[in-house]
Each structure stands twice: as structure tokens, then as C-alpha cells.
Amino acid sequence: MELAVSIGSRLGSDHRLTELANTAASNIDNTLREVRNAAAQKQVSAPGLAGLHGALQTATLPVSPTEEIHDPAPVVTSFPSLAGLDSEHWLHAFVDELLAQARASGGITFESTERLLQQRKDEFLRDFLTARRMYRAYPRLFPEIGDEPPQAISP
Amino acid sequence: MNFDPRGFSELTRKATEMMSDTADVPSVLRSRLGDQHELTRAADQMVASVEILVRELRSFDTSAEPVVTDNYQDQ
């Protein structure tokens, strides 16, 4: 991290502030690397982590249903799968929640569907803002995104 | 040791900005993965170390700006 280097160059490598800066830089690098690894390996089942990583990609890449199928996934007959969307696409979680809600309440209303969709949108925007700050602060940790031209936000 | 105090104020400002930028990472991970997940703990550790750095930098550089946090609040 440049900040740690700048502090070290001013105060020397043995100064307490330099050590604190190096520790902070190391912790930031480790956290981001672990998040990236976990998202890439898809070992974490929580949708939010994929959202963090996915939001970064969404910030630079348009939604391209026919090009984002990476997994030789088993045949699934859900609507998002039939539409050719990646398994981490937000529509999967949305449809699952909508169906669960319908089973629980005995029906689907426009109001509940709109609420659910708004929740998905809010969640995406939160992840996107966090991911964008992380990317802007540490672009070298996201080399696969750095070469892509910027695109509009399209969850 | 001699150093440029103006340069140090800038470093303090950048560190404060970095603290704001990373402040909500633990809460995002906690809400998705839970308190005990290793990524949540790593993020907590990251934020704590950044906060300590900023606090020490501000002590060192008395001309630094006031700390401003930028936590995203859930609606």
C-alpha cells in the first residue's frame, strides 16, 4: 500500500506508525484476497459474497446471459436457468424468495413482489457501492477487471 | 527526525479516507455470512487496524482534519 510506503519513507521502517501502516495494509490485502478467493471458488453458499464479487464485475460488464454460463451445471428447470442466466444471478434468489413467499402466504401480490424486488435492488446497490470503493482503492487486486472498459450499472 | 508536516497531514487525510471507504465492509459480510465466519473476522481485524493507524496518525499529526465516517445505513 502506498500509504505504508510513504509513512515508512518519512519515519523509517522501525517506527511504530510504519509498523501500524504495514499491519493495516497487510490486513486489507488479506481480506480482499480471501473475499476474492471465496467468491471465485464458490465455496461460500451465502449469496451476498457472490454479490460483492459479482457487483464488481457488473460494474464493468454488461449482463450477457448467453456468455456468462461457466459451469457445466446439472440440468435445472427454473425460469432463470431456462433463460440462460448464471447460477449466481440475482434473479435466481429473487424467484426462489418469491415462490417461498407465495407458498407461505398462499399467493403472490403485486405489492409483495415489488417489495421483494426493491429489497434485491437495495442489496445490489449496497454491494455495488462497497465493491466499487474496494476496486477504486485497490485496483491491482482485481486484475481481471482492470482491463475491461467501464460500463453502466446493470444488475 | 525531520519530516514535512504538510505531507503528513495529507497522509493522515488519505488514511482517514481509507477508513471511511472500508468501514462498512464488516457489516456487509456480517449480514451475509454471520459473526463467526472467517471473512467477517478478517474484515473486523482489517477495520480495527485501519482505525488504530488513523488514531495514531492523528495523534502524531495535530493538524489533521476531524475524523468523518461514512457508514452506509440500511434502510
Image (tube, rainbow, N blue to C red):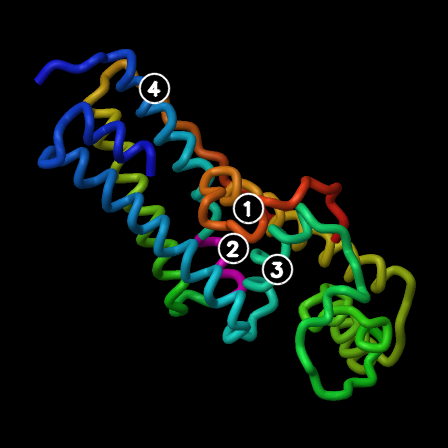
Circle on res. A130? 1
Residue B10 included in the magenta stretch of the image? no
Residue that mark 4 sits on: B10
Earlier in the chain: of badge 1 and badge 3, it is: 3
- Mark 4 — on which chain does it sit? B
What amino acid type should be assigned to the residue bearing mark 1?
Thr
Image quarter for residue A111?
Answer: bottom right
Separation (CA) of disc 4 from disc 3:
33 Å
- Check disc 3 and report the residue beneath it: A51
Image spot of residue A96 (x, y percent): 76, 75
CA gap, disc 4 to disc 2? 29 Å
- The residues tagged by marks 1 and 3 sit, at their Cα atoms, a distance apart of 10 Å
Residue A87 is labelled as none
Marks 4 and 3 belong to one chain: no
The reply to whether callout 4 and callout 3 are in contact (CB within 8 Å) is: no
* Front tag of 3 and 2: 3
For the residues labelled 3 and 2, the Cα–Cα distance comes to: 10 Å
Residue at the disc numbered 2: B28
> Furthest residue to the right?
A110
Lower position in the chain sequence, tag 4 or tag 2: 4
Image position, residue B23 (x, y; %): 43, 43
**Of B62 and A89, which appears nearest the observer?**
A89
